[in-house]
Image (tube, grey):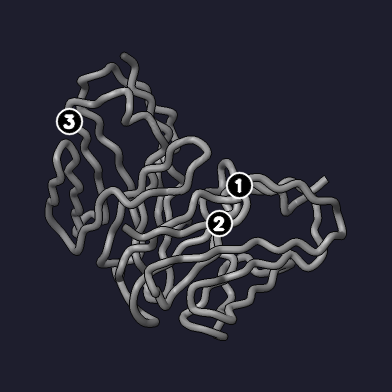
Amino acid sequence: QKEVEQDPGPLSVPEGAIVSLNCTYSNSAFQYFMWYRQYSRKGPELLMYTYSSGNKEDGRFTAQVDKSSKYISLFIRDSQPSDSATYLCAAQGAQKLVFGQGTRLTINP
Amino acid sequence: DVKVTQSSRYLVKRTGEKVFLECVQDMDHENMFWYRQDPGLGLRLIYFSYDVKMKEKGDIPEGYSVSREKKERFSLILESASTNQTSMYLCASRDSGSYSHQPQHFGDGTRLSIL
């Protein structure tokens, strides 16, 4: 079993929709969680960074961590075609960052 | 903003060649990382370095080595390139010490093809 599981999609939604991206993790020692966005032929860029349980909001993006169920989510409100990318969740272990496989998202105009 | 620069965006080499991938960061970060990214497998850690002249094996170090002679530069070496090393290689850096929770910042990757 992978330490961080993420549905690879692809996921396709119309412009303006609310997008929900999700990951589960198995290691209860994880406390720091990140979401990266990766455009085609580019490196991952840090989108959101959260500690422990709760919500963090940044503009149209909300990251949510539920440590009791080992579930992390990223919500995108009023989605735009420019949000089309692969989204990677990650959890910080003792020495290294553990990534999910990435979800490929397309926002259709 | 953190800037992580990888020397080549695309590289084509032949089997058996020794290949050098270079990465430079401009934020005085102690920690640097090399990953490879393959469809269906996600990002896998090859090697990382906590500081100058220090290195640690990641999850898939076989066939690779690294060099960190200066703080800002971290090199990945394919000792004798093979076709199964065709991949996207990503370099990352991070602030602070060995067990820091600071997020990693990535370069734009080198797409390496081994023929």
Mark 3 is surrounded, within 10 Å at the Cα level, by few (under 14), some (14 to 19) or many (20 or more) other residues, namely: some
Question: Which residue: 19% across, 54% down?
Answer: A66
Q: Which mark is residue B6?
A: 2
Give the chain letter at badge 1: B
Q: Which residue is mark 1?
A: B9
Please state if A56 lies on the left or on the right of A103 as rendered: left
Mark 1 is surrounded, within 10 Å at the Cα level, by few (under 14), some (14 to 19) or many (20 or more) other residues, namely: some
Residue lying farthest to the top in this orientation: A109
Could you say whether the residue bearing mark 1 is in a helix, strand or loop? Answer: loop
> Which quadrant, please, contains the C terminus of chain A?
top left
Q: Position of residue A71 (x, y in %)?
A: 26, 51
Q: Position of residue B7 (x, y in %)?
A: 60, 56
Q: Amino acid at mark 3?
A: Arg
Q: Position of residue B26 (x, y in %)?
A: 42, 66
Residues at discs 1 and 2 both on one chain:
yes
Residues at discs 1 and 3 both on one chain:
no
Front position in the image: A19 or B48? B48
Q: Position of residue B46 (x, y in %)?
A: 59, 66
CA gap between label 2 and label 3 equals 33 Å
CA gap between label 1 and label 3 equals 33 Å
Q: Amino acid at mark 1?
A: Arg
Which of discs 1 and 3 lies nearer the camera? The answer is 1
Front position in the image: B88 or A105? B88
Question: Which residue: 43% across, 33% down?
Answer: A104
Q: Which residue is mark 3?
A: A77
Give the chain letter at badge 3: A
